[in-house]
Image: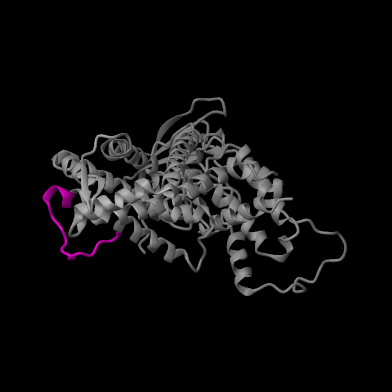
Amino acid sequence: MNWSQLFTSSIGKKLVMALTGFFLVVFLLVHCYINANVLFSNAEENFNRAAHFMGSNILIRIMEIGLFLGFILHIVQGYKLELQNRSSRKSRYAVTAGNKTSKWYSRSMALLGTLILLFLVLHLVHFWVPSRFGGLAEVEYDGKTYHNLYAQMQDIFSVPWVVVVYLLGCFSLSWHLLHGVQSAAQTLGITSKNYYQTIKNIGIVFSILVPLIFALMPLFVHFGWQINTGDISLLF
Amino acid sequence: MQHYSMNLKLKVWRQRNANDQGHFETYDVENVSSEMSFLEMIDVLNERLIAKGDEPIAFDHDCREGICGMCSMVIDGRPHGPWKGTTTCQLHMRAFKDGDLITVEPFRANAFPVIKDLMVSRTAFDRIIQAGGYISVNTGNAVDGNAIPIEKDKADASFAAAACIGCGACVAACKNASAMLFVSAKVSHLALLPQGEPERKQRVVNMIAQMDKEGFGSCTNTYACEAECPKEISVLNIARLNKEYLHSSLSAD
């Protein structure tokens, strides 16, 4: 066998899903950490400076290309696997066990992924496109000009239905991660008797905590809430 | 527990042969004892069908003591029926109550084509075993069984995996018709033992290649297989299989 089969066999295809999945999980952590600035005091300046760093650092810009590739691989491979798996049972059962033997979200990864994809397109149009291709207001801190991405957030999240869509996006993400994190660990063969429960618990905590923090952002911006932390910022 | 008898409605998949479309037929089965096994209940129904001159329902069975892996069928959406860790032959009618409608279907998967009624061909599993689920031994005098020391926990894990009877319930239960639990049990059983060491790398690669060729779906870790397995094979074996496969592929010559 040659090593390329490692990515084309049934296990290999899953491996691609797991590796890109973990990569996207790391992205979520970074994204969540940076954006959490909007929850605290001095949100506008702290967030705009953090966003400026992410947009101007050459290493991060290169990573951004990797991130897009990661997304595309995860999405394309995910749909291919879903189609293949569906076609491996041509005659369907009249009665199925449903939730008696497995969790609904573990069987609905393609559906949840599709919801996240729809959200992602909207999200890119809202923030990534204007910050890369212009259209943002500018603001000055200490004599230096920055994009006012925070003002864009205030603008976008002033519309109630947008806030609701973002909350639904976070909700889908949470269910997707609840299965995804431990599933990726299983595919990579990390799971074993001693770590089984630990890995499951890490997955549960991550899949609740990260989407929850994300969900707070549109709510905080919409209602103008802020947690008072004085001058402390998460980054910069 | 009180013995009782019941009248049931049985909705059974009837299919003359592999090329037939197949359809459901409903039968009334009266006076079923709560102490009968599910297969005995079908035996009784079949005797009545034969007496009437009808074609009896074809189904697989052999040992009828839960160890051979021959019996199959999906009962109300559950391979081997509603009881946990139980084969169809060990499922007793006390799992049901008077007046129940029970839907009985064959295991469904492209890799398990229906032969007739509730019988499916599971020879795909045989071909996976032929691809690597064995160890080669030299002929000659029998080797002393205790000559090779094996750690207790490995021996236990290997034995637990070897409990797989190859019935195919994992495939039947999986939404993707994946055979990963079966293959993982067979790979784990040998990979954990020193006797399995010489063919360890080739075994996992060849068995997965055959599994893919047979048209099983791939695993999405819903773990319905573990929930339905009559021998309660753990999905941790699938993690071990993945690890074995990764390791063998990366270190291939």
**Rendered residue at 46%/40% (across/down):** A69
What is the span of residues highlighted in magenta in the rendered image?
A219-236
- Dominant secondary structure, magenta: loop
**Rendered residue at 54%/55% (across/down):** B238
Where is residue B177? Give x, y as percent.
51, 41
Where is residue B192? Give x, y as percent.
65, 64
Left or right of residue B157, residue A41 in this image: left
Task: Please identify the quadrant where the C terminus of chain A is shown.
Answer: bottom left
Left or right of residue A63, residue A142 in this image: left
**Rendered residue at 50%/69% (across/down):** A194
Residue A232 counted in the magenta span? yes
Task: Please identify the quadrant where the N terminus of chain A is shown.
Answer: top right
Where is residue A176? Give x, y as percent.
36, 48
Query: Residue A197 versus residue B42: which sits nearer the camera?
Result: A197
Query: Residue B115 versus residue B216: which sits nearer the camera?
Result: B216
Q: Is residue B20 above or below residue A15?
A: above
Where is residue B52? Give x, y as percent.
48, 32
Q: Residue furthest front?
A: A143
Observer able to see residue B5: no
Q: How many numbered markers are drawn?
A: 0
Which image quarter: residue A111? Answer: top left
**Rendered residue at 27%/48% (across/down):** A170
Residue B199 counted in the magenta span? no
